[in-house]
Amino acid sequence: MKNLFRLSCCLLLVFSAGCATTPPADAGKPTPLLLVSIDGYRADYLDRGLTPTVAMLAHDGVRTAMQPSFPSLTFPNHYTIVTGLRPDHHGIVNNTMYDAQLGKFSLHNRKAVSDGRWWAEGTPLWETADRHGLLTATMFWPGTEADIHGRHPDHWEPYDGTVTPNQRVDQVLAWLDLPAARRPSFLTLYFDDVDHAGHYHGPDSPQVEQALRETDQALARLVQGLKQRGLFDRINLIVLADHGMAPVPLDHSVLIERELGLDDVQVVSLGVLAGFNPKPGHDFAAIEARMERPHPHMQCWDKTRVPARLAYGHNPRVPQLLCLANVGWRITTADWLASHKGHISVGEHGYDNAAPQMRALFVAHGPAFRDGVMVPPFPNVDVYPLMVHLLGLPPQPSDGDYDAVKDMLEPAAR
């Protein structure tokens, strides 16, 4: 994995007082901004008392329960956070998609994930920063592996799930140790163990508690490293999540083949949000009329009739027929369940973004932020205008509203 383990002696001994350095302030550059995502960290996890580092940042900074965009899935929401656009507008409309020109997209399709054409409907923050002379570094973030509009972050790593939380932290600290001329002003850091534990074992499991503790320990390592460098009070930190997590019992499965013939449609996706497109030679209007009738554990719509509050359905990549499971249910097939026996998620997300279980963590700490403030919940599209303001960058068109979040800043920083 390029660059990750080519760390300096100082970094390898990050906790040694003799290696502590204090990078000089960069004249003419904004206060550095570090955006940290803890995938699947539901907002109320903070109240469990298992993450003292996050709690400290919240106590000395700003906290709220943030609303994800619909669908409350990983790739759509991570790209929303760095573009300020809802998934319907930036084009990453699901973790699994179909595009008439590009074909199929999924999280595990490395070729598609690294193809900038999938991401080109949005302008990520690292691209705007680059165009205005700021250096960027991303320790894993959806979209950073792709050449979007001809640009990558200045420093980036291809996703590798075997890289430990501590190793991810050490890489960020290594970037902050670079000489001033090469040091990034905008950085990202991504953790995924909490999300994995939530899927495999459920949000109320001991495994989630352990993942929360271990991720918090990595954050403590980050905070200690920042303090040793004299940066902790000179960097703006935003620690957030993309979505929450809901428990889904093993027997809470809607078997979609009992509702429509799978040979009669193109199946784009299954799961919490299932999507289907017309197939030549079949009466799709009749299929939709049947599917849009009430169902016990899901609701279906033609994409043109999705409730307006979900802000979804106009992008060509959104399938023509959508079925959304009720919270606590999944949409799947008997064959899929049989082939995945023993590996079925008992925690899920992707549900209606108004569901309390989908609320995501938001904590902000640093010189720009007020101390000890809990602000009203806001949609995650508002994080983007907040970040471009902190970096002094011109915002690209977005769905976010800076006025909705400016009161979390110290008056001098607004």
Image (tube, rainbow, N blue to C red):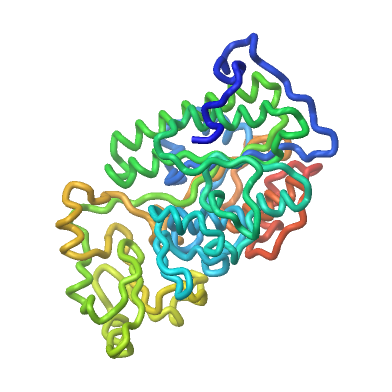
Q: Where is residue 236, by image quadrant?
A: top right
In the displayed image of the protein, which residue is found farthest to the right?
Answer: 28
Q: Position of residue 52 (x, y in %)?
A: 49, 28
Q: Is residue 222 above or below residue 362?
A: above
Q: Position of residue 267 (x, y in %)?
A: 31, 72
Can residue 414 be seen here? no
In the displayed image of the protein, which residue is found farthest to the top?
Answer: 18
Q: Position of residue 332 (x, y in %)?
A: 24, 64
**Residue lying at 44% horizontally and 33% vertically, measured from the top left:** 163
**Residue lying at 56% horizontally and 59% vertically, measured from the top left:** 116
Can residue 85 be seen here? yes
Q: Nearer the viewer, residue 79 or 241?
A: 79
Q: Is residue 370 left or right of residue 143?
A: right
Q: Position of residue 48 (x, y in %)?
A: 40, 35
**Residue lying at 43% horizontally and 41% vertically, measured from the top left:** 192
Q: Where is residue 362, by image quadrant?
A: top right
**Residue lying at 49% horizontally and 46% vertically, measured from the top left:** 241
Q: Where is residue 262, by image quadrant?
A: bottom left
Q: Is residue 221 above or below residue 105?
A: above
| Numbered disc total | 0
Q: Nearer the viewer, residue 8 or 58?
A: 8
Q: Is residue 325 left or right of residue 11?
A: left
